[in-house]
Structure formats: C-alpha cells, structure tokens
Amino acid sequence: MSKLHKPHEQQESDRLGWAFCLNAGFTVIEFIGGFLTNSTAIMADAVHDLGDSLSIGSAWLLQRLSRKDSDKVFTYGYRRLSLFGALINSVILIAGAGWILFRTLPRLFNPEMPVVEGMLGLSILGISVNGFAAWKLRSGKSLNEKVLNWHLLEDALGWCAVLIVSVVLLYQEWPILDPLLAIGFTTFILINVYKHFRETVLLFFQAVPASLLTDKINAELKTLDVVADIHDVHCWSLVGEHHVYTAHLGLNIHMDSQALLGLKALIAEKLSPFALTHTTIELEFPDEHCREH
C-alpha cells in the first residue's frame, strides 16, 4: 500500500516507529561513545536520549492502541490514549530539560575541558540521526507527534551546540561555552514545549479545542430561521483533531416528521465545514421543557 493510500493513523504509526528505532539505536551508540571518550556530557545526553526513546516507544504503543474500535466500555473508542501519550511525553520532556539545567548550571562555575575529537564526531552523527527522525515526524498533525517532534528537535539542537563547542574548543580552550550553549537551547525548548503541554492539558480536561469554535458553530446554527435559541452546548476534542459537539436547539414552530427531516439535513449542512467527528443535536419544540434543566 502506497503512502498516499495509507490511512492517517497508519502513517502516524509508521513515523513513530521510525523515530523510535532511530532514537533507541543512537542511544546505544551514545553510551558506548560516552564511555570511550570519557565524556560526562555525552553520557548525560545518553541518559536523556534513553528517556526520549522510552517516551517515543510508549507513544508508539499508545498510538496503536488508540486505533482500536469503540466498544461497550469506551464508546468513543481509544483515541484519547494518544492524547494521554502526548501528556506523558510533555511531562518527561519538561522534566528532562530541567534535569539538564540542573546538571549544567554548576559547570558555569567549574567548567571542564572535554575530549574534543570524540565530541566532534558524535555531534555530527547526532545531528544526522535526530535531524532525520525529526524530519520523519515533520508532517505529523496530532499533538502526540508534535510533542515528540520537540523531543527530537531538542536532541538535534543539543548536538548542534556540541558541534559548535567542539569546533571552537579545537582552537580555543574555553570550556565554559559548553554549559552556556546547553542552557540556551534547553531554555528555548522549555518555552516551546510549554505551549504544547498547555494545549494538551486543556484538551485532556475537555476544554473547547479551538478559540471561539463553539461560538462559530452556534452562530452558524442560529442562521436557521426556525431556531429560537441554543442551549446545553458542549464541545470538546478527543485528541486535538477529532472534535465532539452536542447541543439543544429550541425551535420557534412545531414541525411534522417530513419538515424535521429537512431541518436535520440543513443542520448537517451548517455543521459540515467544522469537520466534527461526533455531533448530537436535540430539537425542542415551543413550550417543551428541557429535560436537562
């Protein structure tokens, strides 16, 4: 099956699988390289990449589980497992970046000269592997893939810092550049991953998935002449892509079954631009008491 004909979920699974294999394999190389070069910085990054590999592996597993069909227990299916994976990985990424800062800050006051040649070789390999893995996830649309992409970009930027420091240290003995660059790229990643983390948390607790989305849907439905009011509105997202909308529409006239069928078709037409995955609309006739109040 060609990529063009693969469903979106299968393409996402393939991208996560590539990222996991590349990251896990390179983590092994890092541990070996860190031992051979006697570099604590590379060993520390290897531990960080090990955490990334575990995160990507768990995300891959959760993403595959999220494709299961709905059942009697999970009537909306298992898609929110993918969102849960994004939440876990955001926490791990923030914790990992914090750990890097904790390890790096003391080196500002007591810088150490690393084995420059080993750093240079591993940095080139690190940029290649992590850059390729990030490229594989670049087209990902789910929050899970976006967060994991920051995992990989964090690693690639980290190795860019190692490369720059290695080149400079070949000519100048300025070991303090290592902690300075590490602090810089880690702070940058923390700022950006926070945005995804905040969005993931909001969606996890069923916040409205996009700014003013509910107002836009309600405004569109109110253009129907027979709709007097809209109430008991609920809008949330399963994974940041698949949205759910429910509402009660109060009608200003009584309608027979044939007219109701026409109204339902008009409502479906009004809702179609919003690409909602699940919609539940209840129609209430004039003077009918809403059972939710």
Image (cartoon, rainbow, N blue to C red):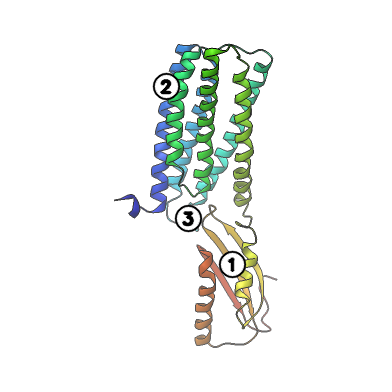
Foreground tag (1 vs 2): 2
Q: Amino acid at mark 2?
A: Ile
Query: Label 3: which residue?
Result: 77
Q: Amino acid at mark 3?
A: Gly
Please identify the residue farthest to the left as the structure is shown. Answer: 1
- 180 up-or-down from 201: above or below: above
Query: Label 1: which residue?
Result: 246
Does label 3 or label 2 sit earlier along the sequence? 2
Q: In the image, 230: left or right of 256?
A: right
Q: Amino acid at mark 1?
A: Thr
Q: Position of residue 281 (x, y in %)?
A: 57, 72
The residues bearing labels 1 and 2 have C-alpha atoms spaced at a distance of 51 Å
Query: Label 2: which residue?
Result: 29
Q: Secondary structure at mark 2?
A: helix
Depth check, front residue: 110 or 7: 110
The residues bearing labels 3 and 2 have C-alpha atoms spaced at a distance of 39 Å
Q: Position of residue 289 (x, y in %)?
A: 68, 78
